Amino acid sequence: MFSRIIVAVNNFVMRFRKHRFPAGSVLLIAPRCIHRSDCKLNVEEDINDCVLCGRCNVKELVELSRKSGLRCVISRGGREAAAFAKDPSIKGIIAVACVKELAMGILAVFPKPVIAVSNCLPNGACKDTCVNMDELRRAVSEMISG
Ligand code: SF4
């Protein structure tokens, strides 16, 4: 409940303040559970290793990052996500995760701006999750300038 409030208030403030940055300084961070569990490709190391078969949302993440120019990584956990986000060259973050991880991440990287998008859990927590791509594209359009 507390996590949901943090995420909702954060996103409300983000939309109110309208932070916008060049695409190259925006990082999209997605959780490893979005990567289909039976796919053997090492997209956690480099998302561009995805061959775009379309069986999980990694395909759309690759296409979105190529089209918009933002950087995109798959994180193995909250600590790694925070480390990615704290890179000084990163000015804004779009984070995909479960609500609890999003809330912890927002607090961990504060005051860096984060738009938080919660993932869907059709197979339960932490396995073969997915994200609403319309919501994610909206977040990207709200954070990238130009
Ligand atoms: S879209 Fe296909 S190739 Fe890419 S990570 Fe998902 S399952 Fe693997």
Image: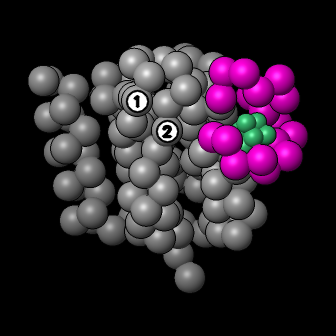
Q: Is residue 44 magenta?
A: yes
Q: Residue drawn 85% across and 46% down?
A: 51
Q: Residue drawn 49% across and 38% down?
A: 130
In the depicted structure, whether residue 85 falls above or below residue 133: above
Displayed-image quarter of ligand 1: top right
What is the spatial separation of the Cα atoms under label 2 and label 1, in whole angstroms?
8 Å
Q: Main secondary structure of the magenta part?
A: loop
Residue span colored magenta: 36-56
Q: Quadrant of residue 64?
A: bottom right
Q: Circle 2 is placed at which residue position?
A: 130
Q: Residue drawn 19% across and 32% down?
A: 4
Residue 58 image point, x, y percent: 67, 43
Residue 31 image point, x, y percent: 56, 29
Q: Circle 1 is placed at which residue position?
A: 122
Determine if residue 110 is in view: no
- Please state which amino acid type lies under the numbered disc 1: Pro
Please state, as top left, top right, bottom left or bottom right, where the N terminus lies in the image.
top left
Whichever of callouts 2 and 1 sits on the residue coming sooner in the sequence is 1
Q: Residue drawn 27% across and 63% down?
A: 15
